[in-house]
Amino acid sequence: MVKRYLCKRLLYLLPVMLGVSLITFGLINLAPGDPAEIILRAGGVEPTREAVEALREELGLNDPVYVQYLRWLWNVLHFDLGTSFRTGMPVTQELWARFPATLELTLAAMVVMVLLAVPAGILSALYRHTFIDHFSRICALVGASLPSFWKGLMLIYFLAVVWGIFPVMGRGGLRHLVLPAVTLGFGMAAVYTRILRASMLDVFGQEYIKVARAKGLKERWVIGRHALKNALLPVVTLFGMSLGHLLGGTVIVETIFAWPGVGKFVVEAIFNRDYPVIQGYALFVAIVFVLVNLLVDISYVFLDPRIRLERGAGE
């Protein structure tokens, strides 16, 4: 049953990738700017019309749009995402070379989020309408309201420029990872804290929690083994979406902190009209989201035995 469910969900990946590729290909071709001219200008010289036309012919940009798309799609079927206009390297190799940096930042941000959100959400639910609850909700509101670029710039100014505790930008040791991870983790923790609080309050009102307490179970057992496990379902759903966004490249944070990940690379590709990189990135993100959400669906079975994969597959 599990194998059938996995195969059925993986088949959904094909129409998703096709739709994403069509939309992305259409949008990037509507964007103003000639990739050939931008590439030639990057060399510091004023390109001539003949040079631009020659480069367009070399890159295949003079072909009709549908021909370009079908050629790209044929290459993808052979596991080839094309070659970057700017670097001349295979797109797959470029993305794969930068993915470890994005993965490292993603895992660090998730650790920060869990360390902040789980205790705050549980304590806020346990001590409802007390100072702890009000303080937690205010911090969550502030964290969710402030944009990532502002939080990043403030952390750089105070912790890197003024006090000199951490490096300003770049990727190196653990100290380079702290500021971007906190910037991402604090913003996510704000959202997760509010969701976990609401979910915990809902679970605390269930009959099985009252029965567990009536049996004299220790409060930490009631919270850890009964309440928290059932309260995690909506959190896990949001976690899958967040993980997909992070693995797809945290564009703003990677750009601010000059973190050499996938997001920063794609921003540069957009400015340079590097069509193969943009198209390959969109396909990569689609695959990441489908696979991450598949893992989230499977995790429901372990969190709540009442959920069965065959029911989800039938839906």
Image (spheres, rainbow, N blue to C red):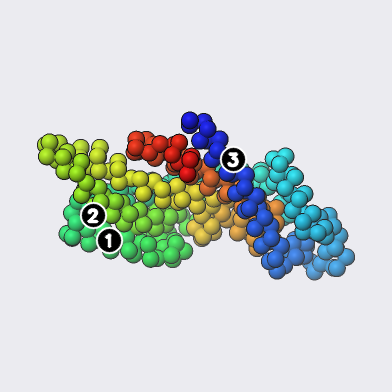
Question: Measured from the top left, where is residue 247 in percent x and y?
Answer: 51, 48
Q: Amino acid at mark 3?
A: Leu
**How many residues crowd around disc 1 within 10 Å: few (fewer than 14), some, or many (20 or more)?**
some
Q: Indicate which disc, 2 or 1, sits on the residue closer to the N terminus.
A: 2
| In the rendered image, the vertical position of residue 151 relative to residue 243, given as above or below | below
- Judge by depth and name the residue closer to the eye, 94 or 169: 94
Which of the numbered marks, if any, corresponds to residue 271?
none
Q: Residue at x 70, y 66 (%)?
A: 30
Q: Indicate which disc, 3 or 1, sits on the residue closer to the N terminus.
A: 3
Q: Residue at x 41, y 51 (%)?
A: 238
Q: Residue at x 51, y 60 (%)?
A: 252
The span from disc 3 to disc 1 (Cα, nearest Å) is 42 Å
Give the residue number, with chain letter if any, for mark 3.
11
Q: Which mark lies nearer to you, 3 or 2?
A: 3
Which of the numbered marks, if any, corresponds to residue 124?
2
The span from disc 3 to disc 2 (Cα, nearest Å) is 42 Å
- Judge by depth and name the residue closer to the eye, 250 or 62: 62
Q: Amino acid at mark 1?
A: Arg
Answer left or right for 299 relative to 23: left
| In the rendered image, the vertical position of residue 211 relative to residue 129, given as above or below | above
Please identify the residue farthest to the right as the structure is shown.
50
Mark 2 element type: helix
Q: Residue at x 83, y 55 (%)?
A: 58
Question: Measured from the top left, where is residue 214 in percent x and y?
Answer: 11, 39
Answer left or right for 275 relative to 281: right
